[in-house]
Amino acid sequence: MTNANATSQASTIDLKLEVVVIPVADVDRAKQFYAGLGWRLDADFVRSDGSRAVQFTPPGSPCSIHLGTAPGLFLVASDIEVARAALAERGIDVSDVFHRGDGPERVSGPDPQRRSYSSFASFSDPDGNGWLVQEVTARLPGRVDTDRTTFNSSAELAAALRRAAEAHGEHEKRTGGQHDENWPDWYADYVVREQAGKELPL
């Protein structure tokens, strides 16, 4: 996408509050507490820089928490370049788009494969509260309720439909190149499965 296109769409991009980082002294103790509340455990893994990521989501909540050592706030957008342009257009001192390599250092530009969860931009408010904007196009398994499919903008839905269309083209090749009259059902199944992190149809 060109910068001109990014700027023209800047007023329409959604930024959704995704994660609030809660500072804790003992991650395992905090994990036991939040699990005891019945909150969904989304993740518990060690990042490439050695830090640990533990995420919970309260029942029915679109926003999650990370257990960490310092406070932080995460926003998600379906297109990181458009989101960055929207912030810059409003006079915000926002970082260039970046991704993480094999270590803790930032690498300039979006993730080369444009993988979901892998491209970022950051900014701070006047009081030093840090915000990290993350591009999310497809949810990891278990990150959404399996009986719900929601989109925050027409752009996000359109992106999901484009991915479904590309996958459906491969599906038609595998079935002999015949036109699939039931393509709306196939698209719907693909989009719902993708958002829920389930195995995608072939």
Image (cartoon, helix red, strand yellow):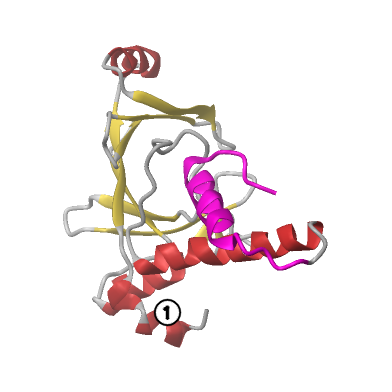
Is residue 42 found left or right of 201 in the rendered image? left
Residue type at numbered disc 1: Ala
In the foreground, 187 or 83: 187
Residue 200 screen position, x and y as percent: 62, 45
Q: Nearer the viewer, residue 172 or 101?
A: 172
Measuring from the top left, give residue 1's x and y in whole percent: 52, 79
Farthest residue to the left: give it.
127
Residue occupied by mark 1: 6
Which quadrant of the view contains residue 77? bottom left
> Residue at the spot x=48%, y=47% of the render?
192
Residue 200 visible in the current orientation:
yes
Question: Residue furthest toward the right?
Answer: 176
Whether the magenta-drawn stretch holds residue 58 is answered as: no
Between 38 and 88, the one lying in front of the other is: 38
Q: Can residue 68 be seen from the camera position used here?
A: no
* First to last magenta residue range: 178-202
